[in-house]
Image (spheres, grey):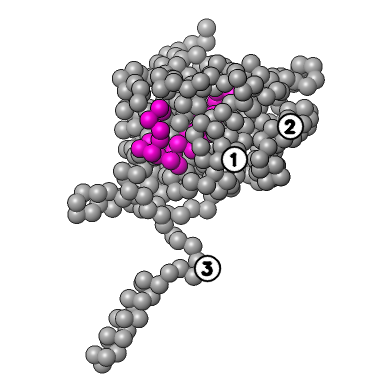
Amino acid sequence: MRTFLVVGLALSTFALAAPLRADESPKERRISREAYRDKMKGGWIGQMAGVGIGGPTEFRWQGTIVPADQVPAWTPETINQFDQDDIYVEMTFLKTLQTHGLDATTRQAGIDFANSKYPLWHANDAGRKRLREGIAPPDSGHPAFNDHADDIDYQIEADFSGLIAPGLPNTAIRLGETFGRLMNYGDGLYGGQFVGAMYAEAFFEDDPEKIVLAGLAAIPKESQYAECVADVIRWHKEHPDDWEAAWKKIDDKYQKNPAYRRFSCSKNEKEPYKFNIDAKLNGAYIVMGLLYGQGDPEKTIVVSTRCGQDSDCNPSNAAGVLFTAIGASKLPAAYTSALDTKTKFNSTDYAFPDVLAVCDDLAAQAVARAGGRVEKSADGTETFVIPVETPRPSALESCWEPGPGAESRFTAEEKAQIRETNK
């Protein structure tokens, strides 16, 4: 009997230690909380770095490549970007989550966004105006009420949704439904969910193509946005050493072809509609930076910037994702040495350290909400144990053939909470 028990225990021990079979996948992933914090910090630094370089070029090159000598040179002080809509809008979303929790409703998000005071444009501006008029989400982002619903806006501010959701694409998708509906619909919404899911994956993956594929898995495969991302991946494989050749193919299909501009806010311009703030075209330029940047921070920012159009938002997203994969502690000192940790972002309560603290707290909540946990070792080291998820994309929809609105309006009590008015 004793021999049987010993053999049985030995076999059990072997079974526990045996590697996974080829047809098995891990059911959870682990990252120390210290590593999470470092990567999350890198993500915020990346956003600031990308928008800092691209800012002076924004929309100055439309349907044309930005000349190499027009890309601003980097200086350490460039990192301090506190007045960019690419960054400060998502601070409002973080504040909503900090105050009301991860289950904050889209109506509460709408009230908070309506009360924001910073300058806005396009879908953000139109959505906020509708909210202040009493049109509640999701109607504030519906094409019937928002002529910019396919624009880039949620895409540029969705970084937060992945930075607080390490390895949790469905959290990023769900947060898109909460916050992206304030101003966007269809491809305009998917762009933000794509970006959020890339950030979520970047905590565990450093291969840019695999990160892009993780983002692609989080949006409806039948959407034009998904088609665009898949095209860029394919064209990169066809022209791995010539990003301008891939850019030309993107331009021919997604800039010049009216079939892919069906809800463009510049559709009334003469051909070829040079100005293009459409989410999917600019999303293509994020992917260009990641794929052709080959994991190099400067090259990623420069390629994404040189693609043109919204050439500060796109490198901000691309660098944010890449810098998350790298982690702040491994970045060149030129990106971190002059970082201002005291100035608050425009019209927000947050300086840089405040943002990190809020994200850290929300990430722990997100992990627990998804069925994960925080393990604490004897020495006090904490580890996020995160269940592996299969992404569940939002339903397929398009701005040019939208479904019916929700007839969603704020109640009198909710309207009383909106202090800001359209001017």
Answer with left or right where residue 397 lies relative to residue 102: right
The residue shown at (27%, 86%) is 5
Magenta stretch, overall SS:
helix
Quarter containing the N terminus? bottom left
Q: Position of residue 111 (x, y in %)?
A: 45, 23
- Are dots 2 and 1 in contact, CB under 8 Å? no
Magenta range:
309-335
- Front position in the image: 18 or 196: 18
Q: Is residue 398 visible to us here?
A: no
Q: Position of residue 29 (x, y in %)?
A: 41, 54
Residue 22 image label? 3
Q: Residues within 10 Å of mark 1 (few under 14, many from 20)?
A: many
Mark 3 or mark 2, which has the lower sequence index? Answer: 3
Q: Position of residue 219 (x, y in %)?
A: 60, 43
Mark 3 or mark 1, which has the lower sequence index? Answer: 3
Return the residue at label 2: 248
Closer mark to the observer between disc 3 and disc 1:
1
> Which residue occupies the extreme top position in the image?
423
SS for callout 3: loop
Return the residue at label 1: 291
Number of numbered callouts drawn = 3
**3D distance between C-alphas at marks 3 and 1:** 28 Å
